Amino acid sequence: MHEKGLLIVLSGPSGVGKGTVRKEIFSQPDTKFEYSISMTTRSPREGEVNGVDYFFKTREEFEQLIEQGKLLEYAEFVGNYYGTPVDYVRETLNKGRDVFLEIEVQGARQVREKFPDGLFIFLMPPSLTELKNRIVTRGTETEDIINNRLNVAKEEIEMMHLYDYVVENDQIDLACERINAIVVAEHCRRERVEPKYLKMLEVK
Ligand SMILES: Nc1ncnc2c1ncn2[C@@H]1O[C@H](COP(=O)(O)OP(=O)(O)OP(=O)(O)O)[C@@H](O)[C@H]1O
Ligand SMILES: Nc1nc2c(ncn2[C@@H]2O[C@H](COP(=O)(O)O)[C@@H](O)[C@H]2O)c(=O)[nH]1
């Protein structure tokens, strides 16, 4: 029987770079986490692939998933539903694998209630000006939606105290290194590896 894996939750305001950082972490060959692909009612952006970026659903399909208890958490974010498939998360954790969720703040709060031992990381932009610059430069949303997302962003940033760690995404590679280091440190702390090393000091 494997030990249960660690549930890692990455949140942060829209445009901070969660997706970019997550993709960079998962492009590294030594990454051992499993990414949980979310469900959403949002329309695919150019280049997004069903079953890779998201499982794209109609509102009716999504509401059925809610009724059937198939979601670990879900939230309505700027007009669309987003949610995490519960079976995938539980099965993967039970195999002893770490699962990585990239979700917004309301969903992260629900996960915290169900998985108080999860590892909750909040990604911060260097400034609000830079946040706006990133979401505008991405060019995937209309001006109205960008403004809505930026308004929600301020409320989300106020919630950062609910997280175990706050990581600044000033540079993508540094943000990835910080997140990887946090996960390694949390594994050591939780598995209490130090007794193994302290044994080296025991006098024979
Ligand atoms: N460290 C960084 N420095 C400069 N630009 C960045 C950095 N990280 C991400 N970006 C850019 O910022 C934009 C937003 O990034 P991304 O889509 O990953 O954000 P997100 O947090 O996943 O947003 P959303 O929550 O809206 O999905 C992208 O154009 C990305 O290339
Ligand atoms: N509560 C959840 N939030 C999720 C999930 N998957 C993604 N997200 C977050 O939604 C916003 C908007 O995403 P976008 O792709 O439309 O830009 C962003 O903060 C995502 O992290 C989920 O399963 N549950």
Image (cartoon, rainbow, N blue to C red):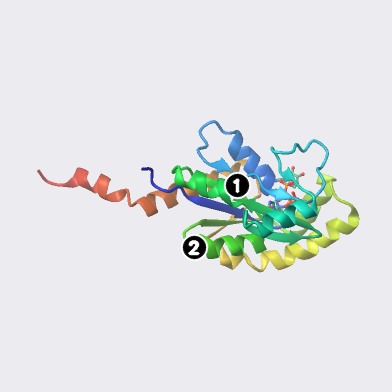
- Name the amino acid type tagged 2: Pro
Q: Residue at x 21, y 43 (%)?
A: 200
From the top left corner, tell me how far across and down residue 54 is, in percent.
71, 43
- Name the amino acid type tagged 1: Ala
Q: Is mark 1 on a helix, strand or loop?
A: helix
Residue 185 visible somewhere in the drawing: yes
Q: Mark 1 points at which residue?
A: 175
Q: Mark 2 points at which residue?
A: 116
Callout 2: CB less than 8 Å from ligand 2: no
Q: Which residue is drawn at 32% across and 48% down?
A: 193
Q: Residue at x 26, y 50 (%)?
A: 195
Q: Which residue is drawn at 78% across and 49% down?
A: 134
- The quadrant of the rendering that contains the N terminus is top left
Left or right? Give the position of 201 relative to 53.
left
Earlier residue among tags 2 and 1: 2
From the top left corner, tell me how far across and down residue 171 is, in percent.
65, 45
118 vs 127, nearest the viewer: 118
Residue 14 visible somewhere in the drawing: no
| Marker count (numbered) | 2
Q: How crowded is mark 2: few (under 14 residues within 10 Å), some or many (20 or more)?
A: few
Disc nearest the viewer among 2 and 1: 2
Callout 1: CB less than 8 Å from ligand 1: yes
Distance between the alpha carbons at the discs numbered 2 and 1 = 24 Å
Residue 82 against residue 139 in the figure, above or below: below
From the top left corner, tell me how far across and down residue 178 is, in percent.
54, 48
34 vs 192, nearest the viewer: 34
Q: Is mark 2 on a helix, strand or loop?
A: loop
- The quadrant of the rendering that contains the C terminus is top left
Task: Determine the residue located farthest toward the left in the rendered image.
Answer: 204
Task: Determine the residue located farthest toward the right in the rendered image.
Answer: 143
From the top left corner, tell me how far across and down residue 106 is, in percent.
66, 64
